[in-house]
Image (tube, helix red, strand yellow):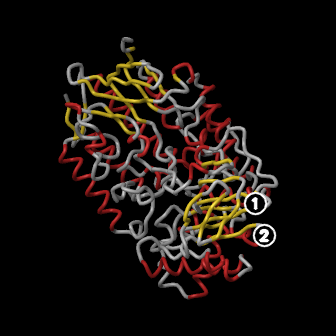
Amino acid sequence: MTAFERYDAVVVGAGFAGLYMLHRLRKLGLSVRVIEAGTDVGGTWYWNRYPGARCDVESLEYGYQFDPELQQSWSWSERYAAQPEILDYIRHVADRFDLRRDIMFGTRVDSAHFDDGSNDWRVITDRGARYQARFCIMATGCLSVPTWPDISGADTFAGETYHTGRWPHEGVDFTGQRVGVIGTGSSAIQSIPIMADQAAELFVFQRTPNFSVPAQNEPMDRELEALVKANYADFRARNGQMQSAFGARHPRSEASALEATEAERQRQFEHHWQLGGLLFLRAYGDLLVNPEANELACEFIRDKIRSIVRDPQVSEKLLPDSVVGCKRLCADTGYFETFNRPHVHLVDLRESPIECITPEGIRQGGQDYPLDALVFATGFDAMTGALARIDIRGRKGVALSERWEDGPKTYLGLQVAGFPNLFTITGPGSPSVLTNMLYSIEQHVDWISDCVDDLRRTGLTTIEPAVEAETAWVEHVNEMAGMTLFTHCNSWYLGANVPGKPRVFMPYLGFPEYVARCNEIRERGYEGFVFG
């Protein structure tokens, strides 16, 4: 049997989180092995190459801030960067800091078991590599495991099948084809207009209509870029004080939508519609806490859809009936306009669900839709999916899947009781997906790095949460969510898109408050943690 190769730390994943984690641990003088399933760095932006894939946070805010020279030297081409450019940026960072030499590519982790005797983690990969390390750090990403719907006959389809989360790297040309898209979430909303440019016929199978606001993307404003770069530190600091850690140039109005006149509301909503994307939700301070205020914003967007889509029957089917913002708001470029094209067809699954997939296409409502290609835009097993696919076992061989049987439990989204020295970057219980992910990633990596350094300097061997602290934190996360409208619809924040997954609100609401709490806990000697 192959012996275990010894490192100070094993990091799983080479996206934004894994790369920065590697960089920080190297600075501490630790030996590190990073394990990555892809053939190169990039994480989410390596796998998600579907047409139109684009970030919904402005480019000037979506980048590392740990290195001032890196910030100054890189220039983005658009207000919202597209996937190829983001991947170029990540590759540039890997080259700049010579990170690839410590990464094992094309490799998946099968198991990670804590050894009670040595207080080490033993990690085994699908290629038979075996590693032993004091620290095991999961940088596996929040949206990295695609979900596939359980539809009868899916394996019989004779045409090509794709998932937006696992798009072929060489791209796909749908020219002249009849294409079916299942799903109308973010990846579908971004890709459907582009697929419609190619396909002879495009059928969109919609179960739940989604709220979407135009991204208002444009070429990078070089004057704005120069202004931001002239004082990047202040710009970053102001972003860090935002609840979502982005959009400092457009802070949320604290006024109430209910107290404004109808004319004032229309002007305010229109202004934020023109700002674009996620910024729309900053029109008023009570949109995500007051159902009546939220409904005013919903109706504004519905009226926009009615004005864009010419066929009234189609537009009515596209109108969302949920709470705007309880799912991550989508940002699009010409999505609703696409349904004005004669070769684009909307199939409403609320009227009749898909009966089955046949070798020739999809059967729904007693009608057959012949297809040459089928695209699943059906989302991800968010926040916990990647961890659930690894056999992770803590003290006394207890499986993480067993500890999380009723939903994920963490302290600060960083650690799990009974799993010493196992860290999760942007895990459930942290702000992560409700923020600019780059801010959350850097904050987590910095905290973990400081923690590891503190352990080494004080001669302590292990750290893990006390069960009581973990329980209290989970209650606090859900208490915060319960004060808002985030729990008022079936979203992937709750795991509602995965059959059988416990319904637990996973992200923490409020970035500045969270950072302050993390810092306070460390300053108090890691309050709520247990050392070995």
Which residue is under mark 1? Answer: 196
| Label placed on residue 141 | none
Q: Is residue 366 visible?
A: yes
Front-lying residue, 23 or 380: 380
Q: Of the residues shown, which amino acid type is indicated by label 1?
A: Ala
The residue drawn where x is 69% and y is 59% is 192
Mark 2 lies on a secondary structure that is loop
Image side of residue 190 versus residue 508, left or right:
right
Q: Give percent across and percent down for residue 71.
A: 62, 38
Mark 1 lies on a secondary structure that is helix
Q: Of the residues shown, which amino acid type is indicated by label 2?
A: Arg
Instruction: Please give the count of numbered marks on the rendered protein.
Output: 2
Q: Is residue 238 visible?
A: no
The residue drawn where x is 33% and y is 43% is 519
- Cα distance, mark 1 to mark 2? 8 Å
Q: Are marks 1 and 2 in contact (CB under 8 Å)?
A: yes
How dense is the environment of label 1, judged by Cα within 10 Å: few (below 14), some, or many (20 and up)? many
How dense is the environment of label 2, judged by Cα within 10 Å: few (below 14), some, or many (20 and up)? some
Q: Give percent across and percent down for residue 283.
A: 55, 72
The residue drawn where x is 40% and y is 19% is 130
The residue drawn where x is 61% and y is 55% is 187
Q: Give percent across and percent down for residue 15.
A: 53, 36
Task: Classify residue 338 by image quadrant.
Answer: bottom right
Front-lying residue, 46 or 520: 46
Quadrant assignment for the N terminus:
top left
Q: Give percent across and percent down for residue 226.
A: 70, 47
Image side of residue 269 versus residue 147, left or right:
right
Task: Classify residue 314 by image quadrant.
Answer: bottom right
Residue 86 vertical position relative to residue 303 in the rendered view, above or below:
above
Which residue is under mark 2? Answer: 341
Residue 371 vertical position relative to residue 226 in the rendered view, above or below:
below
